[in-house]
Image (cartoon, rainbow, N blue to C red):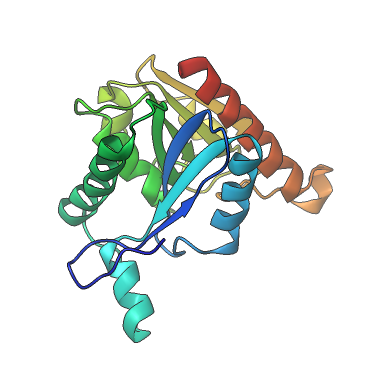
Amino acid sequence: MTISEQNNEPSIIESFVESPVGLLIFAHGAGADKSHPYIEKVTRLFNDEKINVVRFNFPYMDKRLLDGKKYPPNRMPILLPCYQQVLNTYIKKNKTGLPIFIGGKSMGSRVAVTLACEEQNIAGVICIGYPFHPQKKPEKLRLEPLQQTRYPVHILQGDRDALGSKEDVAEYDLSPLCEISFYEDGDHDLKPRVKSGYTHEQHINNAITRAVRFIHEKS
């Protein structure tokens, strides 16, 4: 289902399954929209585990797709209300009481964790490649949401992620509600180098398996 942009509402895709055990609202990263192959793959893996997935575009991405121009990501004062709007919609629609999780890839995960600093009707947050700092700017930390979250957070992170490596993260003071799973030699997309002996598919599959376990643990 796609929600029209005419009313300034984000475009949404629902990927739903029979007899679901949870609902995940998942936001894209800075450079890829809700239908990017990476997001599609993650969605299929969650669906295979009976998790309903809602994907949506932030306003700048819908604008990119509308006129083909490469607009920069919106700032938090726009990203947060957009995500909150989608979350509120599915809280209202959730008549069967499915546990609701929020999350995203990179920038989308940062927005999700920031929402989790406020009272929400959610069970937890799932982050793939959390952007602990901008690339090549390790001094500009984005830790506050991970220190103030009110809900359990699970981060799936490549251990050589340029936006927060395993070595970097070891130095950070995060909330005890935050858990991190690292993937050997993985980059920001969890992709390892060939010499590591791992494959990208292995890391993605293992990451989603861990995320699904988190969903069952926190539901």
In front here: 21 or 131? 21
Q: Quadrant of residue 172?
A: top left
Total label count?
0
Q: Is residue 91 left or right of residue 211?
A: left
Taking the image as drawn, is residue 183 in sight?
no
Q: Quadrant of residue 212?
A: top right
Whole-percent x, y for residue 32 in the image: 46, 64
Whole-percent x, y for residue 115 in the image: 25, 36
**Placement of the N terminus among the 4 image quadrants:** bottom left
In front here: 138 or 53? 53
Taking the image as drawn, is residue 5 in sight?
yes
Whole-percent x, y for residue 78 in the image: 18, 56
Whole-percent x, y for residue 138 in the image: 39, 44
Q: Quadrant of residue 71?
A: bottom left
In front here: 95 or 129? 95
| Residue drawn at the location 39% of the way across and 60% of the way down | 30
Q: Is residue 216 left or right of residue 146?
A: right
> Where 50 falls versus 70 (above or below)?
above
> Where 120 falls versus 159 (above or below)?
above
| Residue drawn at the location 67% of the way across and 50% of the way down | 191
| Residue drawn at the location 30% of the way across and 64% of the way down | 73
